[in-house]
Image: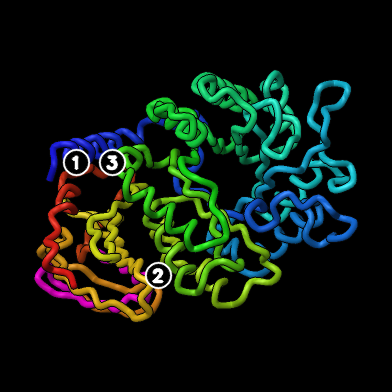
Amino acid sequence: MSTTTKNCWCSLLLFIGAATLVVALENGLARTPPMGWLAWERFRCNTDCKNDPENCISDHLFRTMTDIIISEGYADVGYEYINIDDCWLEKKRNFHGQLVPDKQRFPYGMKSLADYIHSKGLKFGIYEDYGNYTCAGYPGILGYMENDASLFAAWDVDYVKLDGCYSNHREMDEGYPQFGFHLNQTGRPMIYSCSWPVYQIYSGIKPNYSSIINHCNLWRNWDDIQDSWSSVESIIEYYGKNQDSIVPNAGPGHWNDPDMLIIGNFGLSYEQSKTQMAMWAVFAAPLLMSVDLRKIRPEYKAILQNKKIIDVNQDPLGIQGRRIYKELGIEIWARPITPLYQNYYSYAIVFLNRRTDGTPSDISVTLKDIALKYPGGYRVEDLYEDVDYGILSPQTKIKVKVNPTGVVILRCNLQVEDVYDSNQYTPYSPLDQLYKVRRNSFK
């Protein structure tokens, strides 16, 4: 293992130990990755309510999705935010310089919509842009930061996404923290989702993650997701290639955001949809569905509501997973999770088959070869197939069959009686063992 890799893991461990002492943004929010529903990927900027009233960006659409989140069991497994994206505004501010919701599509205003969402026990998210305009050409926040933050608080907003179109990317290092300060000053807790690093990366600027993790609850750092397997695969590859620089930034209160879940739309097969859900769980990513919940097929709904995989995503340690093996289209990813004991973690393990040759691939490995070395063994469970392998020792070889562009995700729990206490745990060193994988153990 390289010195760079060792240093990265040491930095991660020190950061995790401090995470419980530092409250990102001073808002105490997003201690686990946010979960909810977001309009953009599925409904984009459809403002034609005259010809397409059921699918346009409107008060009706968001109230409908709110009702479905409750009635169809999504809220029961953790989805709680109903988030508006771009295209909700009038093209100009009012006489007093305030943002104005489109009068035709949001006739009751945003406070009324927020009240409705809150009445169902859910939370309300809104979109704006650190620029002169939003990406779709509506008013941005520049020149109005304090006023807009106060307005969002008056509307009882719970979550603010701040995009970065039509802006000076070098000014973001000052501008994003400034708007976050104004959000805090309102006294209303609001999750702060930033697009700060991704725009700087586009411009060849190295993001200052030390600042980003202290001012944003989550942030985008790669391309917008599109409704295709190639898009999902490119995000997975980005997170694998850049894990040394981005994994240490994730933790309770501050998360890398690989963008929305597109499960149940048009571009992913059933196997690919299972892959996205499993990988986003290992990434410790926000789970923001962008799908028409009125039309989703049962098998895709089951993926989105898989409580065992959601539990991995929401693990209280908040450690983002890593790719520990990649060869000939086969990858293995590992995420340390609870319960932990002394110098050992439990793990979520994903076997990913990126091959497209039309036949499942067999992968076999002993637990110790992927750093699962606890002498007492691990209870191993397949989280999609509900297969319980029982308690396996580190010497046990496990074999899985993985479909093309598909995954197998296992939960490997330490077999100990001690109760994990998230307020008193101490981070330990065996995470670096994840890199000690013998390639001849796989086929």
**Residue shown at 62%/37% (left/top)?**
160
Label 1: which residue? Answer: 5
Label 3: which residue? Answer: 244
**Residue shown at 19%/74% (left/top)?**
364
Residue 245 is one of the magenta-drawn residues: no
Q: Amino acid at mark 3?
A: Asp
Q: Are marks 3 and 1 in contact (CB under 8 Å)?
A: yes
Write down the region rendered in magenta. 392-413
Q: Position of residue 324 (x, y in %)?
A: 23, 55
Mark 2, secondary structure of its residue: loop
Crowding at label 2, few (<14), some or many (≥20) Cα neighbours within 10 Å?
Answer: many
Task: Examine the rendered structure and indicate whether residue 336 appears above or below residue 274.
Answer: above
Nearer-N-terminus badge (1/2): 1
Q: Position of residue 363 (x, y in %)?
A: 23, 74
Magenta part, dominant SS: strand
Q: Nearer the viewer, mark 1 or mark 2?
A: 2
Q: Which numbered marker is on residue 127?
A: none
**Observer-nearest of 19 and 241:** 241
Nearer-N-terminus badge (3/1): 1
Nearer-N-terminus badge (3/2): 3
**Residue shown at 81%/62% (left/top)?**
54
Judge from the rendering whether residue 263 lies leftward or rightward of residue 342; answer left or right.
Answer: right
Mark 1, secondary structure of its residue: helix
**Observer-nearest of 218 and 150:** 218
Q: Quadrant of residue 308?
A: bottom left
Q: Are marks 1 and 2 in contact (CB under 8 Å)?
A: no
Label 2: which residue? Answer: 405
Q: Position of residue 327 (x, y in %)?
A: 23, 62
Task: Examine the rendered structure and indicate whether residue 129 appears above or below residue 65.
Answer: above
